Image (cartoon, coloured by chain):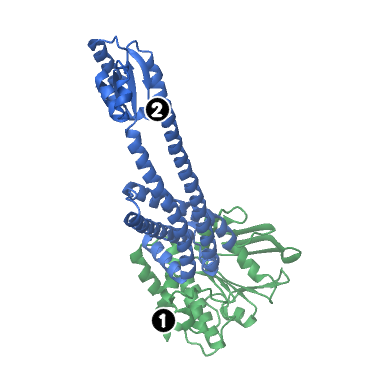
Chain colours: A blue, B green
């Protein structure tokens, strides 16, 4: 029986090619746009993750801290906040500053090394956001061995805002495209049912259930949407290749993202088709 | 089997049926006779639940009018075999596919059972040699025989025929009537709607005359055993 539904769907697609082409082209256009946005979001997220991985907290130590106290602090930091803690003593800190400034005369004007020793803490992944980093910094700051804590708060906050804005943008774009998919599928199904009204009426008179009449139309909509999604992914891939060849290396969507994209499109088309059929069959069937 | 109890049906201001009551038993042959606009087709549409009565009750088997959901309505229709004046065949399907559609809709039969059932029905109406033809390649009589094959393929208890010979030339009309009579004699109840008295009498069943939405008279039929031969110069389809 399921094969029968697929054959019916194929028959309908063949008989209403114009309608099917229009639907597939409109859906492909909308989905390609959303695919490009998805590609952009994916690459920006990759970049943000790369930058995020470099986020660290610098814990400046009091000059009076002994080695035992320092080791105790390192153990506590590793337990609570970090995945890796690197000790930078006063001399190393001075050398790093010298390398950065490069102006020997200016450095020689300073009599003694004023820089404190520090611990550079590579934070746990769950702490790589502004709020968590700020909380962690405030907690560490009260440890007796600690002089001060720096983590580039403003920079981290802006980075987080950028990531959040991007995710919101992706959601809005996704929602807009979802509405477009529902709109296109809904109207295509309505037009297809109207075009096949005599057939629907005859089937209804022969005692066909709504499910029996609707199944081929639903399959047809899902096939159209799946085809449009695959075409859109192909176009996005072609765009990515062209961009990479001419501008800069970008990463294509991971297989899981592409599969989720295809699945979401097919699911939306199923919903839109069911919605359209629940209304239109009541109007068409005798 | 089918009962109309004080059934009235209005379409806006127009009164299509006015307090009509009649009953049809299992296996009976009943003809609704009347001029165009008398309300005959309204009776058929009430039986198939395409429309509901304005008042009164229509009972078809255990299905009572006015209380049926869409799925129950579909179930009711699957117990009936309906034949229309304009055939209502799907023009993008072969004769075989048109008949097979009714079997698929029934939903009770495995794919392997579809072919033998359809072929049996096509043999009964003498159309097995036209199984791959499309409706627009058939004559009027052949189209109606294909429609009859579709109506009988699921062995319904009742066959409703809405002016089945209305669009046919006399020779084909005789063939179709002979076929319907034979199907009735094999056990199916037959309710035929016509404007032509000779068609009503040819079938030999009980005749209810409807005029202006009211039952005017009822004539007892000759009964299946006494039924007169159909029209003139007719050989039953199966014998050809």
Q: Position of residue A284 (x, y in %)?
A: 58, 63
Q: Position of residue A158 (x, y in %)?
A: 45, 34
Q: Give me the chain letter of mark 2.
A: A
B187 and B155: which is toward the camera: B155
Please report the residue visible at 44 percent of the width from the left and 41 percent of the height from the top.
A167
Q: Which residue is mark 1?
A: B130
Q: Position of residue A230 (x, y in %)?
A: 37, 58
Identify the element where label 2 is drawn.
Answer: loop
Identify the element where label 1 is drawn.
Answer: helix
Q: Are marks 1 and 2 in contact (CB under 8 Å)?
A: no
Q: Position of residue A47 (x, y in %)?
A: 35, 41
Q: Which residue is mark 2?
A: A152
Q: Quadrant of residue B227?
A: bottom right
Number of residues whose C-alpha sits closer than 10 Å to that of mark 1, classed few (under 14), some (14–19) or many (20 or more) = some
Inspect this view and state whether residue B159 appears.
no
**Separation of residues labelled 1 and 2 (CA atoms):** 85 Å
A262 and A271: which is toward the camera: A262
- Left or right of A121: which side holds A11? right
- Left or right of B203: which side holds B237? left
- Left or right of A33: which side holds A237? left
A120 and B137: which is toward the camera: A120
Please report the residue visible at 36 percent of the width from the left and 50 percent of the height from the top.
A258
Q: Quadrant of the N terminus of chain B?
A: bottom right
Q: Quadrant of residue A12?
A: bottom left
Circle 1 or circle 2, nearest the eye: 2
- Above or below, A89 against B198 in this view is above
């Amino acid at each position: 029986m399921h094969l029968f539904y697929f054959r019916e769907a194929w028959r309908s697609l063949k008989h209403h090619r114009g309608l099917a082409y229009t639907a597939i082209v409109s859906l492909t256009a909308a989905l390609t746009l959303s695919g490009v946005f998805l590609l952009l979001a994916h690459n920006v997220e990759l970049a943000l993750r790369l930058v995020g991985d470099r986020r660290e907290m610098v814990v400046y130590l009091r000059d009076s801290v002994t080695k035992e106290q320092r080791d105790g602090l390192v153990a506590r930091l590793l337990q609570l906040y970090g995945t890796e803690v690197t000790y930078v003593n006063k001399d190393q800190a001075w050398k790093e500053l010298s390398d950065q400034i490069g102006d020997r005369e200016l450095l020689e004007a300073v009599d003694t090394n004023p820089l404190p020793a520090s611990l550079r803490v590579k934070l746990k992944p769950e702490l790589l956001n502004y709020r968590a980093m700020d909380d962690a910094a405030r907690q560490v700051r009260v440890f007796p061995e600690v002089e001060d804590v720096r983590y580039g708060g403003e920079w981290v906050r802006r980075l987080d805002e950028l990531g959040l804005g991007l995710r919101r943008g992706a959601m809005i774009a996704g929602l807009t495209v979802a509405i477009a998919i529902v709109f296109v599928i809904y109207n295509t199904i309505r037009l297809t049912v109207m075009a096949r009204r005599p057939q629907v009426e005859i089937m209804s008179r022969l005692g066909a259930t709504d499910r029996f009449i609707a199944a081929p139309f639903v399959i047809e909509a899902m096939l159209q949407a799946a085809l449009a999604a695959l075409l859109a992914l192909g176009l996005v891939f072609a765009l990515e290749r062209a961009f990479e060849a001419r501008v800069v290396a970008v990463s294509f969507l991971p297989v899981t993202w592409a599969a989720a994209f295809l699945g979401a499109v097919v699911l939306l088309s199923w919903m839109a088709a069911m919605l359209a059929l629940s209304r239109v069959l009541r109007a068409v069937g005798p | 089997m089918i009962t109309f109890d004080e059934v009235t049906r209005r379409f806006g201001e127009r009164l299509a049926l006015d307090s009509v009551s009649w009953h049809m038993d299992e296996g009976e042959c009943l003809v609704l006779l009347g001029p165009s606009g008398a309300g005959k087709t309204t009776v058929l549409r009430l039986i198939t639940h395409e429309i509901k009565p304005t008042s009164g009750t229509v009972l078809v088997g255990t299905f009572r009018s006015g209380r049926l959901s869409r799925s129950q309505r579909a179930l009711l229709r699957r117990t009936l075999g309906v034949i229309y004046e304009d055939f209502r065949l799907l023009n993008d399907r072969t004769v075989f596919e048109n008949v097979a559609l009714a079997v698929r809709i029934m939903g009770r039969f495995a794919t392997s059972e579809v072919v033998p059932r359809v072929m049996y029905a096509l043999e009964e109406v003498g159309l097995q040699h036209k199984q791959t033809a499309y409706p627009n390649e058939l004559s009027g009589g052949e189209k109606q025989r294909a429609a009859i094959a579709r109506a009988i393929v699921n062995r319904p208890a009742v066959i409703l025929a809405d002016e089945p010979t209305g669009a046919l030339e006399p020779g084909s009309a005789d063939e179709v009537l002979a076929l319907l009579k034979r199907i009735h004699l094999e056990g199916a109840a037959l309710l035929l709607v016509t404007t032509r008295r000779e068609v009503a009498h040819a079938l030999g069943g009980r005749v209810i005359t409807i005029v202006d939405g009211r039952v005017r008279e009822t004539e007892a039929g000759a009964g299946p055993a006494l039924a007169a031969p159909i029209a003139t110069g007719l050989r039953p389809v199966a014998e050809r």
